[in-house]
C-alpha cells in the first residue's frame, strides 16, 4: 500500500495558526480526537501550502517536561525546536515500508504527507499507529485472516 491510502487527510486534521498558543493547539487536538495538529500560517488556511509544522502528543509531553507555558506561541516554540515539517515528511506515493524507514531513521512517530508533484502541498499526516494498523491488516489479508463470515461481527 501507499502512504496516501492510509494517511489522515488534511481536511480531517485540526489546524491552528502560527500565533496560536500551545494550550490552544492541545485543545484542538483533543476536541478533534486526533493525535496531531497542523500549524499553518493562518488557522483557516484552505490552500495547499502554508503548513509550518505539526505538533503531536510527544511534543506536548516535551513542552510539559520543559515547563513551557501553555500560553507560549506555537511558532516560537516550533522555531526553538527546529521542528520544521520538511524533515518529517514523506511523499504520498511512497510505499508504507519507506514511511516506516523515515520514521525510524528520524525517531519520529508522525510524518507530514506531501504531494508527489510538489513537496509544498500537504495532503495529510501518517502516524506510526496508522502504519502499524495498515501493515497488520495487509499481513492478515495475505494470510487470509479476518475475511471469513465469522469476522463480520468484530
Image (cartoon, helix red, strand yellow):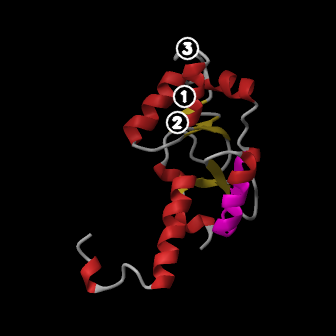
Crowding at label 1, few (<14), some or many (≥20) Cα neighbours within 10 Å?
few
Q: Identify the residue at image location x=74%, y=47%.
A: 106
Q: Quadrant of the C terminus?
A: bottom left
Residue in front for this viewpoint, 75 or 148 = 148
**Which residues make up the magenta segment?**
88-102
Q: Would residue 89 be counted in the magenta stretch?
A: yes
Disc 2 to disc 3, C-alpha distance:
16 Å
Q: Identify the residue at image location x=59%, y=65%.
A: 4
* Image location of residue 19, percent across then percent down: 60, 23
Disc 3 to disc 1, C-alpha distance:
12 Å
Quadrant for residue 30, please give it.
top left
Q: In this view, does 113 lie to the left or right of 26?
A: right
Quadrant for residue 86, please give it.
top right
Quadrant for residue 67, please give it.
top right
Crowding at label 3, few (<14), some or many (≥20) Cα neighbours within 10 Å?
few
**Of the numbered discs in the image, which one, if any, rests on residue 61?**
1
Q: In which quarter of the image is the N terminus?
A: bottom right
Residue 94 vertical position relative to residue 87 in the rendered view, above or below: below
**Of the numbered discs in the image, which one, if any, rests on residue 57?**
2
Crowding at label 2, few (<14), some or many (≥20) Cα neighbours within 10 Å?
some
Q: Do the residues labelled 2 and 3 touch (CB within 8 Å)?
A: no
Q: Identify the residue at image location x=52%, y=76%.
A: 139
**Which comes before the other along the chain, label 2 or label 3?**
2
Which residue is the site of mark 3?
Answer: 69
Q: Are marks 2 and 1 in contact (CB under 8 Å)?
A: yes
Residue 29 vertical position relative to residue 68 in the rendered view, above or below: below
Amino acid at each position: 500500500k501507499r502512504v496516501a491510502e492510509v494517511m489522515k487527510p488534511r481536511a480531517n486534521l485540526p489546524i491552528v495558526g502560527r500565533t496560536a498558543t500551545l494550550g490552544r493547539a492541545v485543545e484542538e487536538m483533543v476536541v478533534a480526537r486526533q493525535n496531531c495538529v497542523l500549524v499553518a500560517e493562518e488557522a483557516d488556511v484552505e490552500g495547499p501550502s502554508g503548513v509550518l509544522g505539526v505538533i503531536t502528543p510527544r511534543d506536548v509531553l516535551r513542552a510539559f517536561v520543559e515547563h513551557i507555558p501553555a500560553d507560549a506561541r506555537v511558532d516560537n516554540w516550533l522555531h526553538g525546536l527546529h521542528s520544521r515539517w520538511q524533515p518529517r515528511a514523506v511523499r504520498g506515493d511512497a510505499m508504507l515500508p519507506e514511511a516506516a524507514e523515515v520514521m525510524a531513521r528520524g525517531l519520529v512517530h508522525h510524518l507530514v504527507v506531501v504531494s508527489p508533484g510538489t513537496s509544498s502541498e500537504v495532503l495529510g499526516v501518517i502516524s506510526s499507529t496508522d502504519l502499524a494498523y495498515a501493515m497488520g491488516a495487509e499481513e492478515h489479508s495475505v494470510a487470509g485472516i479476518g475475511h471469513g463470515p465469522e469476522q463480520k461481527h468484530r
